[in-house]
Amino acid sequence: MTTDPIADMLTRVRNALKSRHSKVDVPSSKLKLEIARILKDEGYILNFKLAEEGVKKTIKIYLKYTPSNDSVISQLQRISRPGCRVYVGSKEVPKVLGGLGINILTTPQGVMTGKSARKANVGGEVLCQIY
């Protein structure tokens, strides 16, 4: 049992990218599915799908690489952790690398990117940043 399942997901993706794997399997949850959806919508991964193996559900994340075989994701970083939660208001939502990267927030309106949170004028917990 892991104490931080989001950090576990990000670490699995980070390790798979370093090893040049084409896909990675992650134990499923609603929050992880939303994070995978955002990564796909923003173009950081090729695709993802929910696979059921008996009772266990896993998310198969298909990783994306450039034509020169470099990973599209250069860094995945967990911001808010169970020991130190990071919350921001609607006016303080940070930009990642001046808008070149994204951050993922949980807000009262659901899981969304920092850009869409600023547009919707909502704040929330900053889960991670990707660039």
Image: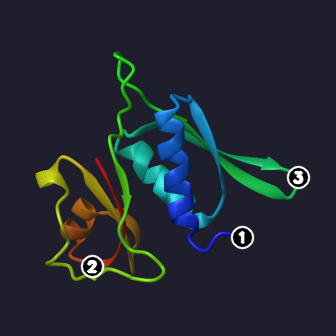
Q: CA distance from mark 1 to mark 3?
A: 19 Å
Left-right relation of 39 to 126: right
Q: Which residue is mark 1?
A: 1
Image quadrant holding the N terminus, namely bottom right
Question: What's the residue type where badge 1 is placed?
Answer: Met
Residue farthest to the top? 68
Tell me, for residue 54, which label it has, or none.
3
Tell me, for residue 34, which label it has, or none.
none
Question: Residue at image x 48%, y 51%?
Answer: 37
Q: Residue 111 at what x, y percent from top left? A: 42, 67
Tell me, for residue 123, which label it has, or none.
2
Q: Residue 5 at what x, y percent from top left? A: 58, 66
Question: Residue at image x 66%, y 58%?
Answer: 28
Left-right relation of 30 to 105: right
Question: What's the residue type where badge 2 is placed?
Answer: Gly
Question: What's the residue type where badge 3 is placed?
Answer: Gly
**What is the secondary structure assignment of the residue under circle 1?**
loop
Q: Residue 73 at what x, y percent from top left? A: 36, 40
First in residue order: circle 2 vs circle 1? 1
